[in-house]
Image: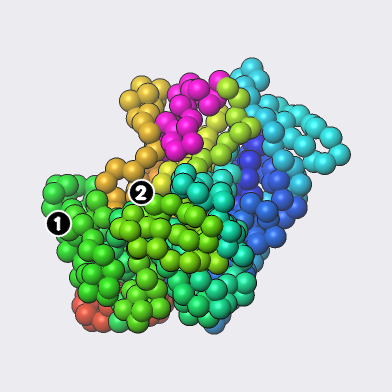
Amino acid sequence: MSETVAVIGAGPAGIAAARYLKGQGFAPVLFEAHDAPGGQWNRQNPRSGIWPEMRTNTARMVTKLSDGTYPEGTALFPRNGEVLAMLRALAERFGLLDDARFGAEVTGLCRDGAGWRVTWNDGAGEHAESFPRAVVATGRFNRPWAPEVPGLGDFSGALGVRHSFDYDGPEAWRGKRVVIAGGATSAVEIASDLAMAGAARVHVAQRRQRYVIPKVVAGVPIEYLGLTLGAARAAETAPPDRLAAERDRFIKEIGGNPAAYGCPPADPDVEKAGVTGCPYYLDLVAEDRITVHSWIARVEGRRVTFADGTAIEADGILMATGFRLSLPFLSDEIARTVRLSPADMELAEFTLHPDLPGLAFLGFWPQFGPYMVALEQQARFVAYAWGGAAPMPSDAALRAAVKPLSATGAPGGGHQAHVMALRFARLAGVAPPGTLARRAVLDRSPVTGETCRLTGPDADPGAERRLRHDFDLFAPADVRAGPAALPRRDGSDAA
C-alpha cells in the first residue's frame, strides 16, 4: 500500500505537490476548505482575491504548470478563469481529485509520533487522521492586512473602506472618487482599472514611488527580457554589485523615469524604490486620470488628508496594502520551531526544517515575478527527495540552511522568480542542461516549467518543441536572428 501524504491546500502549489508525489509512488490526499480546487484562481473560493475580469500580470508560458495547457487562441495574458480551467484539467488528468477532501477546513496540524496528525471540519463535524508526511500549501495571499491610519475607521464615504482583496470590479466605483492606498501590483492595477472604467477621480496614496515596468516591450514579453535562464545563472555567480548595476540599468531602461509621467521621483537605487508592473498606470498618470499622493496622514469623515498637506473628498477607500502569513492550524510546536510570525518564518531551502522531518512548506517566500514555475520545481524537490529520485540534504546541511524567508535584495520586495525556479530545479536534479546545443535558446528564454522538463525524473519529450515555439514567437528579433541551436520540430538546427 502506498504511503499517504496530506497535502493541505488545492491551489497551484497543492496540485503540483500531489502530481509529483503520486508520480513517486505516494498516495497524496488533498485537503481543501472550499468545495473545488484552484485556490486563489477559483473566484468562488471565499479566500480568493481575484476579481471577475482579472487577467494575469505574467505571460501564459510562466503562468502554468508544465503538464497544463491552454487552448489554442488563449491570450498572452490569460483570464483568471482560463488559469483555473488549466489547473483543474491537470488535476483531473492525473487523478488528483479522486481522494481529495473538499469542504474540509483544516483546523489542526501537529506531530503524531513519527508522522503528522491532521484535524479538519467538514461542516458535519470534526475529524482527524494521521499521515506519515504532510505538505502545507495554503499560500501567502489569503490574510489581507492594512496599517493603522488615523480616522480610517470613521470614514463616512458611501463606498466605505475595503481591502483590495475584496475588490470585485469597477461597476460600484463608476462616477465615484476613490483613494487607493498602496504602491505595488494590486494598487496600480486596480487604479488603472478604475481610471479606464469610469471612476470620477482616482487618487493613489503611497509611502514611496516604485519603478513601474510594462508587461510587453515592442512585442516582447518582459519575461524574455529580464526573467531569463541566462539571468538566473548569472545571479548565482556574478558579483552582487555588478548584478545590482545591471538590474538598475534594465529597470530604468524599460520602465523609464516615473517623475517624467507626473509621479513623485523614485529613489535612484532600484532596490530601495522597489519595482512593480502594469502596462497602463504611468500613461494614465500622464493623462491626469490618476493623481499620485504621499501617504494618508488622517481621515475625517469623507475628507482624506495626505502627508504633504493636500486633501480631497472621497467616496471610497481601497487599501491595497498586502497580506500577512496565516497558518492558524499549525500546532504551537511547529509554529515555534519555524519561528512563525505574521511577516515571516524560518526554513531550510524555503521548504523544510531539520526538526520537522516529513513536513514541507510550499510557496511561502515573498517573490517578484510569477510563482507557478518556482512552485512546481519546489514541489518536485520535495517529492523527489522523499521518493529517492533526488538526494535529501543532510541534517547538517539543512541546519546550516535554516533562515528567514524574507527578501534578500530583489527589487519589488521579494526573491526573483527565475532565480528561485532554478534554485529548486537544482535541488530536484532537473536543472536545464548547459550544453551549447541548447543554451542559445534557453539562456534567452524565461525559466518555464518546460525549461525544467528537459532532463531528470519526469523528463518530457515535448518540452523542447514547446520551448522552441514560444522562443520563435516571442524572443527579441535580434536574438531570434542570431545562433539558436535548439533542434526544431523537424530535427534541423537553427541557423
The residue shown at (35%, 75%) is 285
The residue shown at (63%, 41%) is 8
Residue 260 part of the magenta segment:
no
Q: Give residue 411's position: percent from left, percent from top.
A: 29, 54
Q: Give residue 166's position: percent from left, percent from top.
A: 60, 58
Q: Give residue 235's position: percent from left, percent from top.
A: 23, 51
Q: Give residue 288's position: percent from left, percent from top.
A: 36, 79
Asked which colour scheme the image uses, the reply is rainbow
Residue 453 visible: no
**Which is nearer the eye, 5 or 119?**
119
Look at mark 1 in the image and give the residue it sits on. 245
Residue 329, image quadrant: top right
The residue shown at (63%, 45%) is 9
Q: Within 10 angstroms of label 2, few (less than 14), some, or many (20 or more) residues?
A: some
What range of the chain is rendered magenta? 333-356
Q: Which residue is most to the right? A: 124
Look at mark 2 in the image and give the residue it sits on. 414
**Which is nearer the eye, 310 or 188?**
310
Secondary element under disc 1, as helix, strand or loop, is helix
Residue type, numbered disc 2: Gly
- Left-right relation of 304 to 440: right
The residue shown at (50%, 49%) is 151
Q: Within 10 angstroms of label 1, few (less than 14), some, or many (20 or more) residues?
A: few
**Which is nearer the eye, 337 or 446?**
337
8 is higher (above) or lower (below) than 416: above
What kind of secondary structure does the magenta stretch mostly adopt?
loop
